[in-house]
Each structure stands twice: as structure tokens, then as C-alpha cells.
Amino acid sequence: MKTLALAIMLALAAPATAYAQAPAPAPAPAKATAATPAWVTRSNEHAQVLIDAQAKFAPEGFSFFGIPGLDTLTADLGPDNGARFRAATATARAELQRRLELERDANVRQDLAIMIRAADEAIASSTLQERMVLPFADAPQLVFQGINGLLSKQVPAERQAHARERLARYVGLAPGSTPVMVQARQRYEERAGDASLLRPTKLEVEQALQNVDTYAAGIRAQFAEYGIDGVDESLAALDAQSKAYAAWVRADVLPKARTETKLPPELYAERLRQVGIDIDPLVLVQRAQLEFMETRAMMQQLATLVAKEKGIAASDYREVIRALKRDVIPNDALEREYRVAIDAIDPIIREHGIVDVPNRPMQMRLGTPAESAAQPAPHFRPAPLVGNTGQQGTFVLPLGNPALGPEAAYDDFNYPSVAWTLSAHEGRPGHELQFTAMVERGISLARTLFAFNSVNVEGWALYAEAEMVPHEPIDGQLIALQFRLMRAARAMLDPMLNLGLIDRERANRLLLDDVVLSPAMARQEIDRYTFNSPGQAGAYFYGYTRILELRMETELALGKRFDRLAFNNFLLDQGLLPPDQLADAVRTQFIPAHAGK
């Protein structure tokens, strides 16, 4: 059971901390936001109905996005939490339906429909999970994410102090609280006798065990970094409870974990629906296979030019990429080197009229070991959507995958050629710009928190990469194509692994040999497809293709009247609408508005 706010937080970022190896500069004052339209204010009032219903079950996610009054609260893993979540959501849905019948404003009606749909999907997902899955929680990771969401330079000091009480609740030292690790164990054990329920995978459980100490150390370091005292008793309790939880997982959960990682078709279909993929997975595989072949051919054509320019004695794109990777940037210089690309991107975006950009620098920093354990890939940490007073989102770059031990290091992100496409995706004009636009343009909560879908978010970020490719150095263009190849591989391999059409070893070889990923990154990818976030990886390619289709349709409809800057800004103005609703907005609003110009 996962609320949409928590889903956004987990999909985009492991909440960040401030003790990175090279701290980012303090954020500049935010650009003045436009006056909030009256309809958005009314829509947000309606959204509070669903927030009030769901926030008590996963307050960390809503708190992360700035919803007030939730900083000291923790996830509800108590008895019958699934049934109680569905009941609360159903009550909220009925109230939203009542309000829809009375509402006359078209925009507010659309937002109410979005929230009613979100409530229906949350109820259906919770019902299916309870019917089919034995609830296993990586409780140490849950605690880390909850604390990490508060201890950040993006959070005001008065809110950071609430981490003390949140930790006390996690470990059962606050009045009326029960340790979250005890609750997680109880929910597992009360249903463990039902042999029909799907057990967690052995790989998932092993990864959770390997990260227990990393999370505990990360939490302790956070409290020390922010100088929050009065937590010694809670930290001692956390250490003891983490060890006890790990011992129980090792003794009772791991021996019964399943070795088969593919999901039952009904569960996998639900995962695809949750991220916004609305086509048959086999059709997605076919489209991705074509994209993979075409992208690989383009890479081969470009590789000879890169080799000539860089003096590389190779012609095969794989060897050219491996040669580029040997130009390693030391860890202590990574932020500085990335800043070269980051600082060059904004002028390019403005000069070529790609999209409007804020008048302040993008934020980027390295990930900590605990962050990398929770999210072992480059990711974006959004700023608060509510009550934002100038906080910015941050592109977070991990240095490895701590769960892999000696094989944890990446070579995929620490050389100059890769900085361009990663900065475009996680930063501008990708995730950072999309989420900044939602704050600065006053987009409703319905179109941010409750319309969230990975197809929109990741599709925009991959589209943003493609918009930048013609303006990048030729070696940066090659790596941009490599990353596009990886997204096609994801859209192939995620469904194929979950439908039993390929095994882990063959999928891993494709990522190592054809996509040219490091062993640590390839392992992160396979784990992502099979147990960390099955279904989500196909959203990049699918979302990208949906935007390209929509843009081509718009260009054909408008001809010489098509304005790329206006089109891209319009997409951002719509928030996180699912593909069909976004297409409808373009057809009914953007095209008619520009056809007469």
C-alpha cells in the first residue's frame, strides 16, 4: 500500500541529506511565482480531502512535499492498515464525487476527476496487493527515508528539528507509538501461514540485509551533521531494533524467500498501470526492440567521428565508450567537472528557444553511502511543492551501489562525456525544470501529487535529453545515444524478465556488452526490473515516444505556426497529466490557440 505522494518520493529520489562530500551552494531566492488563479486555489481545497485521508498512512511522503502538520508522524503499519487505508480513501472519494457534481469550472472538474481516478486506483492496488502479496517491508530503509526527508538544506531549521520526534516514533519511544520494525514484523507474521501469498525475492531480502548498517550509520551521521541533540536514546534503540530486525529477517524471511523473480501477470499488469504504461507489454517490447536496433546503428555511425576527434584507436562504439570512460574524474572533482556542463546548458536552452528556464543556477551534489543504498542510480530530489520559499530541487549523483560490496563502484557517471546528458535529464531541461515549473507556475496539487505518473515525468526527461543532443559536444552526443539505448533496453528487458521471456544472465550480458554499463550499474538495472521497481523502467521510452507522437501531430496541424518554445512550455504548464489527458489538452487548447496566429 503506497500513497501517490510517497510513490513520487520513491520514484524520483531517495530523500537527500546535507552531508555530501561537496556541499551545494545555498539556493538563491526563488523567482516570483505567478498569482495563483482562483480555480487552482479551489482545486487545492478539494485536494485536501484526499490528502487528509491518505497522509495518516504515509505522512513521510506528504511531509516531503511540504504538506504541513506531518513532520513528526510516521507510516502506519498497524493492524488492518490496508483495510483502513481503503476505507478512508473510499470516504474521500465519495466526497470528491459529491463536489464534482456541484462544480462548474472546467479546470476544477478535471482536477476532481483526476483525484477520483487516483482514489480508485489506490483502492484497487491496495486490494490486489493484500490478496496476492505477503507484506515484507525493508523497515530500516523506511526509517532512513523518513529521517532523510527532514534533514536537508531544502527544509527550514524549525522543520528539521521535528526529525527528533519522528525518530522517537519510529523506535517506539514517543507516547502511543510502537516500533515500526515491530509493526513490520507483525504484519508479515500474521499472514506468513498463507502459502498462496507471494513471498519477497531472495535477492530483495539479501539486499535489505546488506544495507541495514549503512542506513543506521547514515541516520546517525545526519543528526550529527545538523547538530540535533536529545537523540542518543532513540539512536541506541534504533541500532538495537535494526539488529533484531535483521536477525529475524535472516532467520525467518530469507530461508522462505522465492528464487523466481518474475511477477504473476496480474501483479505485473498492475505495476505497469501504476506508472502510466497503458499498452500491452509485448507491444512495448516490440517497439523498444526497433528503437534499440536503430539507436545502436546511430551510435556506430557516430563512434567513428568521436574516435577521430578524441584520438581513440577503435571504431566499434563499445570500445569508443570504454575509452571515454578511462578519462576518470576523481570523486573530489566530480561536482566541479559536472558544473562545466551544467553552466553551459542554460545559455544553450535560451539561445535555441527550447523552453523557459529560471534565472538561478541548478543544484547538483554527490550522494551519500546511505542515499546510494536506497537509490543506487542518479536521481532528482524535488523541492517542496507546498510552502516553497525558494528551495530548489537537487540532482544527486551516487558514487556506487553499496549493496554490492567490492563490486560497488560505477564507471558510468564519472567521466566528462557523460555529464551533458545526465545533467539534461536530472537537471535542465529535465526533472529539475519540470518540478521547478510546477512550483513557480502554481500548478494545482491534483496535477502534481495526484496525477503523478512515471510515463509523464520520465518521458519529459528523456525528451529533454533529446532536445539538447544537437547542441552538445560530439562525445556527449554519443553518450546521450548510449543512455537512449539503455532506455530501450529497459523497455525490452523489464517486461521480458517479468513475463519469463529472458533470464537474468542473458539480460545482464546485453547491458554489459551492448549497452556498455559497468557490472554495478547492470546489477542495479536488473534488480530494478525484478524487485526494486518492476514495471517502472519502461516508462522512460514509452513516455518519450508519446511526447514525440504528440509533437509530430502538433507540427502537422500547425505547420509554420508551430512554436517549439510555446509547445514545450505548454507541456510543463499541464503538470503531470497522464499521456491521454496531456494529448487532449494539446488538441483542445494549444492547437486551437496557435492555429489562428
Image: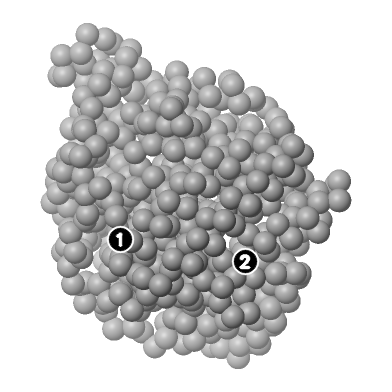
Q: Is residue 71 above or below residue 472?
A: below
Q: Is residue 121 left or right of residue 343?
A: right
Residue at mark 1: 225
Q: Residue at x 64, y 70 (%)?
A: 178
Number of marks in the image? 2
Pick the residue in front: 44 or 529.
529
Residue 228: image x %, image y %? Answer: 35, 70
Characterize the local packing of mark 1: few (<14), some (14-19) or many (20 or more) Cα atoms within 10 angstroms: few
On screen, residue 109 versus residue 547, left or right, reads: right
Q: Nearer the viewer, residue 97 or 422?
A: 422
> What quarter of the picture does the C terminus occupy?
bottom left
Residue visible at 22% across and 72% down in the picture:
30
What is the secondary structure assignment of the residue under circle 1?
A: helix
- Closest to the observer, 526 or 273: 526
Horizontal arrangement in the rendering, residue 217 relative to residue 433 (left or right): right
In this rendering, does residue 461 appear at all? no
Secondary structure, mark 2, is: loop
How far across and how far down the image is residue 171, in percent?
57, 66
At x 50%, y 60%, the residue is 236
Residue where numbered disc 2 is placed: 179
Residue 445 position (above or below residue 461): below
Q: Which residue shows up at 34% across the image and 24% down it?
A: 298
Counting from the top left corner in percent of width and height, residue 20 is at 28, 51
Q: Which quadrant holds residue 311? A: top left
Distance of mark 1 from mark 2, alpha carbons? 25 Å
